[in-house]
């Protein structure tokens, strides 16, 4: 069954569920995290279930060169090498944490195991939990980490995660995010991650598939797709750009860190990462203002020379402005229509983007 394009996920499903129709096609890279993002009821879970073979949809699915489904074949769920993490972890209550982890591991022939138990325990910070015999009494976040570990130990070729943080409170979410980021760096298999939280997607994903009413309305690299003004996410209150950067220098006196990206630098509150570390920053459109001349005497330390690439109305009184900084980086700004007119902003103009706040995410 080695007939699909290698190193990629290619899917197209058609499914009618009572009043809901799914007709979704997308492709995603063979590594990294692809977020399936869309409003409630847009079909994210249904799409994930199709990939798992839990829905018998019509269509095709190829995972890294292997056909899991086409017009003539349908590989059943139990023969698809995938890990599935649900919104709420369901561990075997009568088994210890270690036995829960070993459950999937032992069903895989030793030669096919791609990851060791100790490795997964380390990635997910399970050292202190692994001998616990009372999985029912683990916290929601701990249970979810064990469930992710159990899924990974089946040596899947793809990991499907359906809003794994949605059942957790804010502080458990914050606790588990660094582990997910770690997995993001360590895993060599693709992860499909369902979410309807833009901040989670900005933090964890590399690729974005946007769903609306059962259809894929856009699919592309995260930073590029976040910067598009023609998509529904441009209207979100927390719309903004994602900046991939490198820690360049710490300033001990002012407790700041400089991060460099292609085309410029940003100062942020001091972070722990050593110079050279890769970090991802999120710059919200509402935190960026625009000046037509280089500002002097401003309290804002992040001022970047930029060019206006696109201006689009955003509701009755605002506009979204897309700017390029250097050759590759994009920033978004949300300003009033009045400011646009007073400054006479137009596509192609050179301006100064004043960045009031930057959120560093890893
Ligand atoms: N078995 C089913 N029978 C009938 N309709 C279904 C079935 N499963 C899902 N649906 C409907 O399909 C639509 C998409 O549901 P789905 O759970 O895939 O959306 P979602 O984007 O994951 O939403 P949420 O973010 O709320 O989890 C919904 O309208 C849902 O009611």
Image: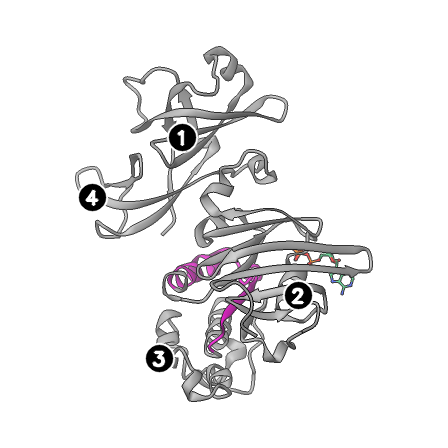
Q: Residue at x 33, y 31 (%)?
A: 326
Quadrant of the image occupied by residue 71:
bottom right
The residue pinned by badge 4 equals 250
For mark 2, give the secondary structure: helix
Residue 301 lies left or right of residue 211; in this view the side is left
How far is disc 2 from disc 3 in space, using C-alphas? 32 Å
Query: Crowding at label 1, few (<14), some or many (≥20) Cα neighbours within 10 Å?
Result: many
Mark 2 or mark 3: which comes first in sequence? 2
Do residues under tags 4 and 2 come within 8 Å of each other at their CB atoms?
Answer: no
Check whether the beta carbons of the residues at disc 3 and disc 4 lie within 8 A of each other. Answer: no
Query: Can residue 44 be seen from the camera position used here?
Result: yes
Q: Position of residue 131 (x, y in %)?
A: 41, 84
Q: Which residue is mark 1?
A: 324
Question: Which callout, 3 or 1, points to the residue nearer the camera?
Answer: 1
Q: Where 287 falls versus 27 (above or below)?
A: above
Q: Does label 4 or label 1 sit earlier along the sequence?
A: 4
Let me know if residue 139 appears in the view. Answer: no
| Left or right of 24, for residue 282 | left
10 Å neighbourhood of mark 4: few (<14), some, or many (≥20)? many
What is the spatial separation of the Cα atoms under label 3 and label 1, in whole angstroms?
Answer: 45 Å
Sooner in the amino-acid sequence: mark 3 or mark 4: 3
State yes or no: Cβ of the residue under disc 2 lies below 8 Å from any atom of ligand 1.
no
Q: SS at mark 3?
A: helix
Q: Quadrant of ligand 1?
A: bottom right
The answer to whether residue 96 is left or right of residue 276 is right
Of residue 301 and residue 152, the one placed in the foreground of this image is: 152
Is 36 magenta? The answer is: no
- The residue that mark 2 highlights is 50
Q: Earlier in the sequence, mark 4 or mark 2?
A: 2
Q: Which residue is mark 3?
A: 118
Q: Is the C-beta separation of discs 2 and 3 under 8 Å? A: no
């Amino acid at each position: 069954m080695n007939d699909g394009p290698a190193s990629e996920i290619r899917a197209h499903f058609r499914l009618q569920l009572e009043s809901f129709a799914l007709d979704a096609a997308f492709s995603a890279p063979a590594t990294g995290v692809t977020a399936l993002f869309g409003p409630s009821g847009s079909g994210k879970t249904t799409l994930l279930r199709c990939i798992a073979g839990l829905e018998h949809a019509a269509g095709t699915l190829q995972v890294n060169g292997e056909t899991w489904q086409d017009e003539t074949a349908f590989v059943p769920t139990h023969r698809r090498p995938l890990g599935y993490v649900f919104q709420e972890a369901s561990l075997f209550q009568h088994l210890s944490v270690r036995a829960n982890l070993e459950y999937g591991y032992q069903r895989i022939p030793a030669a096919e195991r791609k990851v060791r138990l100790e490795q997964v325990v380390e990635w997910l910070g399970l050292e202190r939990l692994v001998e616990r015999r009372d999985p029912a009494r683990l916290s929601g976040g701990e249970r979810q980490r064990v469930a992710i570990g159990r899924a990974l130990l089946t040596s899947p070729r793809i990991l499907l995660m359906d809003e794994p943080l949605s059942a957790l409170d804010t502080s458990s979410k914050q606790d588990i995010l660094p582990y997910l980021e770690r997995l993001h760096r360590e895993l060599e298999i693709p992860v499909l991650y369902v979410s309807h939280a833009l901040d989670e997607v900005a933090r964890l994903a590399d690729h974005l598939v946007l769903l609306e009413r059962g259809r894929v309305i856009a699919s592309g690299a995260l930073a590029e797709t976040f910067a598009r003004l023609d998509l529904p996410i441009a209207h979100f209150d927390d719309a903004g750009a994602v900046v991939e950067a490198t820690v360049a220098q710490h300033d001990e006196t002012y407790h700041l860190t400089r991060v460099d990206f292609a085309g410029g630098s940003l100062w942020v509150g001091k972070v722990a990462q050593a110079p050279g570390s890769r970090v991802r920053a999120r710059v919200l459109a509402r935190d960026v203002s625009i000046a037509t001349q280089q500002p002097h005497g401003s309290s804002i330390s992040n001022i970047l020379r930029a060019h206006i690439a696109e201006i689009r109305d955003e509701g009755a009184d605002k506009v979204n402005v897309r700017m390029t900084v250097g050759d590759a980086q994009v920033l978004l700004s949300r300003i009033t229509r009045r400011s646009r007119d007073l400054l006479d902003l137009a596509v192609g103009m050179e301006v100064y983007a004043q960045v009031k706040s930057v959120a560093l995410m890893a």
